[in-house]
Amino acid sequence: MKTVTVHASVQYDVLIEKGSLARCGALCANVFEPSKATAAVIADDNVAALYLEPVVQSLKQAGFSVCTFVFPHGEDSKSHEVLLHIYDFLIQNNITRSDFLVALGGGVTGDLVGFAAATYLRGIRFVQIPTTFLAAIDSSVGGKTAVNIPAGKNLIGAFHQPSLVVCDPDTFSTLTPEIFADGCAEMIKYAMIWSEEFLQLLESCDIQERLEEIVAYCVDIKRQVVEQDEHDTGIRMILNYGHTLGHAIEKVTNHAVSHGQGVAMGMVLITRLGMKLGRCDAALLHRLCSVLERYHLPFHYDGALSELAESCLHDKKRSGSTIRLILVSTAGKADILPMDTAELETILKGELPC
């Protein structure tokens, strides 16, 4: 088992091992007292059909009382409507601060359940059990929780660290190629912003043969960043490379473009913007596009860039009339560039280098 320990406002372990989902109860018992805690397991209907029963059985075998809640899959469920249903479920099952929630699933579930944990009774503990590659390497770690509103993604949220993350890479085998590729976009992001050596590995290796290692590598990069800046006021912003424009693409397409696809196209667009500003060269763009293609991700956005401008104005990295863009000048090095929103709007209404 690979273990990455995150030293944030809450210290917790990220446990990475194939087959660990069936042992999640025993792993949770190392953190919570089974005789005193009820586990409230929350999953979407797709994940519940695959993994809810073994997780419930594992928790019960470890001595926990268990209750479950299942909601419809999809980005639309990351909403206040579903959140209120979760609160009702927790109240009906007499969940108190001595108990804990379990977010079983992908990024939508982790964000939604994490936000419920952050706000129910002003905060209770929760465990992340990610079942997608994207959630395992990115959204399950670091304590960002949120729901969406019509104005944009993740605009209503809180920082609330999990007490434990249990990652079983065997769960990735049930993902469609498209959903697995979504996680690859975040994997490539880590390489682009942090490690040229990691990028070289991704350009040459078969990641299916090294999944535990890849997950641990990505989680450890995020650990290093989060430990320096838990609340996203400085260096942690670099983790949003490709996300400002990626979230805008998701919004204008009404989520017909997935998160990973949006991030992939967002990384390409921000690199092209960086070229226009003279902060990176065509060789970097070519390298990025090549590795995206290797992992079956899109690198060309067909829509009008001007459509993205308004959505970007609602980005969380905006402060007053300034938005902070994340640019990569050379592979493995990210920079935070403050830019006036009017200037960004002007650039997006023009042409970007190819």
Image: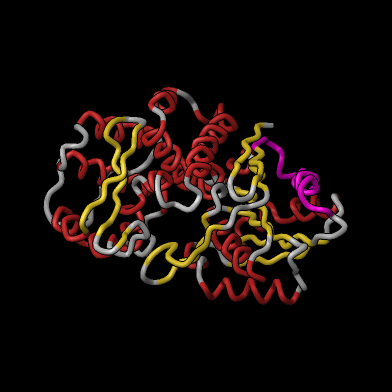
Q: Quadrant of residue 101?
A: bottom right
Q: Residue at x 39, y 72 (%)?
A: 150
Whether residue 305 can be seen here: no
Rendered location of residue 323, percent (x, y) = 28, 56
Up/down of 4 relative to 142, above or below: above
Rendered location of residue 216, percent (x, y) = 57, 34
Start-end of magenta stretch: 16-33
Is 59 left, or right, of 166 in this rendering? right
Rendered location of residue 47, percent (x, y) = 62, 55
Is 91 left, or right, of 260 in this rendering? right
Q: Quadrant of residue 123?
A: bottom right
In front of the other: 98 or 40:
98
Q: Say whether residue 30 is magenta.
A: yes
Up/down of 270 relative to 208, above or below: below
Report the number of numbered marks.
Answer: 0
Q: Residue at x 54, y 35 (%)?
A: 220
Is 4 left, or right, of 322 in this rendering? right
Whether residue 68 can be seen here: yes
Q: Quadrant of the N terminus?
A: top right
Q: Say whether residue 162 is magenta.
A: no
Q: Quadrant of the C terminus?
A: top left
In front of the other: 292 or 198:
198
Up/down of 313 relative to 279, above or below: below
Q: Quadrant of residue 91?
A: bottom right
